[in-house]
Amino acid sequence: MNIHIRQLKKQYSGHTVLDIPELDIASGELLGIVGNNGAGKTTMLRLGLDLIEANEGHISIGDEKVNEGTHWKRHTGSFLDEGFLIGFLTPEEYFYFNGEVYGLSNAQVDEGLGIYKKFLSEDILGTDKYIRQLSTGNKQKVGIVAAMVVNPSVLMLDEPFNFLDPSSQIIIRNMIRNMNKNRGTTMLISSHNINHLADICSRVILLEKGLIIKDIRPDDTVRLEEVEAYFASQAG
């Protein structure tokens, strides 16, 4: 499913935190959203999920404005933070609950979980632990898998590489890449790490103070070097 942004603006107390006049994301595109803390990455995703209200403009998934309809929700998977989780459920219970929302049976969820077992450590499945008892990294894994196992047409993840060890970061990069390649899932993945995004994304936008200041393809090495130089300059 394609995504369209038109005249989108979000303000807090008169301060503009996101201002995107126009952005089109093609169906099947894997878009990376990179920027420092406070650049507007999370705000963009929260607007895309209709979790907050825009001051102006809109985001459409398919032909539907997210703030005016609900059909898009059945086709969109997402994990932004721990607020998406239900702490008093076990991971298995949460996966089944989430699957039911998307119309999947427990058997279908179990089948889907098969390809993620390498990512889900032995500390997560089959332990009878509640999600609230898991480490921050394992909570992150549960949220990401719950968003992916429902096989959405659109996937939005906010800083999915945070809290994960290097091996898990490599696994999730492959998970994202394979899902996009095999299912044609449209993806919006935010990170402050340009290297993670350049490795998997077909396109990367750089946000600064709520504005898109660069829009590049990772195979454009000259412009990618410009982004790396930008972060180096910000570090002083």
Image: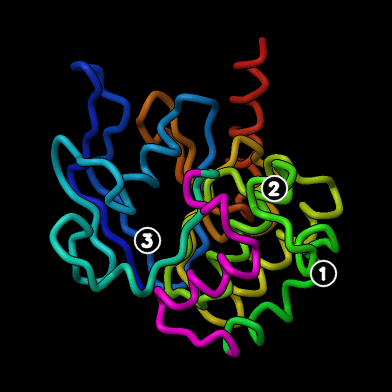
Dots 3 and 2: beta carbons under 8 Å? no
Q: Residue at x 27, y 33 (%)?
A: 19
Count neighbours of disc 3 (C-alpha within 10 A) and say few if under 14, some if 14 to 19, many if 20 or more: some
What amino acid is at disc 3? Ile
Q: Position of residue 67 (x, y in %)?
A: 18, 55
Give the mark, 3 or 2, whose residue is nearer the N terminus: 3
- 141 magenta-colored: no
Residue in front for this viewpoint, 224 or 37: 37
Q: Which residue is mark 3?
A: 25
Q: Position of residue 10 (x, y in %)?
A: 24, 32
Determine whether, in the image, residue 170 is placed left or right of residue 73.
right
Give the mark, 2 or 1, whose residue is nearer the N terminus: 1
Determine whether, in the image, residue 232 is placed left or right of residue 126.
left
Determine whether, in the image, residue 52 is placed left or right of residue 117.
left
Q: Mark 1: which secondary structure?
A: loop
Q: Which mark is residue 196?
A: 2
